[in-house]
Amino acid sequence: MAAPIIKADAGGRYLPQVLEVLRGGGLAISPTTTNYNLICDATNAEAVEKVFEVKKRTKWGPLPVSLPHPKEAARYVDIPEWFDQGILEAMLPGEISFIFRQKFPFPDRLTCGSRTVAISCTTHPVFRSIVVGMERPIAATSANLSGQGNIFVPLQKAVDDLGELVDVVVDAGPTAAELAGQGDRVNTIIDLTFDTPYLVRPGWVPLSEVLRFVPNLNSSVEAHQAALAQRVAQTNARMAA
């Protein structure tokens, strides 16, 4: 049976039902500025496992989390001494994610054993109301089946792929990316877990804006992939031991 689809409204009447689902370990589909996302309570191991199951996600792929406010970052991640936390508060909320070493004991499945986690704070009013209402991190990933590449996921695509596998769908109409005709846009991702910050993926926040705050950024995605591949190999060897 397909999940109920509830319309987002200015009065927030959709919110109690969504929060009840998430607090109970369920899954929801929510709009973001870029894509419709599959979301769950990032601290609930069973809920996180469900995300991988419904997406049929078998590849290595940790789930990013959205926080209620950037000031809470230090509670969940270790911020390097060389990184100015003020940058987070300057760039967040925004469509950019920063990868840190984890401090909070997130489920191993969420981090895929990497002991790192990508954090963000959304600007989307509906998704933000959900995260703030939960008062805890929300895991969020594109609401489509895995293996389809880095595609745009509007509401109908999310419903077609996962509508029968989640507990509730929030309809807030087209996302900003869809309205702008930027269907391939996603969150920009910066990795701060190496000795130098790396650009993981270009996206909604332009590189020129990132460089204003992180001037020593290594913007070579290929260089990051090589560094990450070495780390993943080491992680897999540790987990297999």
Image (spheres, rainbow, N blue to C red):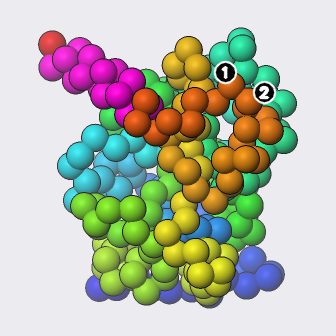
Which residue in the structure is indicated by mark 1?
79
Residue 158 placed where, x, y %?
A: 41, 77
Q: Secondary structure at mark 1?
A: loop
Tell me the magenta residue range. 224-240
Which residue in the structure is indicated by mark 2?
85
Q: Is residue 218 within the magenta segment?
A: no
Q: Is residue 74 left or right of residue 175?
A: right
Label located before the other in sequence (1 or 2): 1
Residue 125 in view of the camera: yes
| Three-letter amino acid code at the position of disc 1 | Ile
Q: Quadrant location of residue 213? A: top right
Q: Is residue 230 within the magenta segment?
A: yes
| Three-letter amino acid code at the position of disc 2 | Gln
Q: Is residue 74 left or right of residue 241?
A: right
Residue 4 higher or lower than 195, as above or below: below
Q: Quadrant of the C terminus?
A: top left
Q: Quadrant of the N terminus?
A: bottom left
Viewer-proximal residue among 136 and 74: 74
Q: Residues within 10 Å of mark 1 (few under 14, many from 20)?
A: some
Viewer-proximal residue among 170 and 160: 160
Residue 126 placed where, x, y %?
A: 69, 70
Residue 109 placed where, x, y %?
A: 33, 38
Viewer-proximal residue among 10 and 155: 155
Q: Quadrant location of residue 218? A: top right
Residue 40 bears which disc, if any?
Answer: none
Residue at position x 58%, y 68% from top? 34
Viewer-proximal residue among 180 and 172: 180
Q: Are marks 1 and 2 in contact (CB under 8 Å)?
A: yes
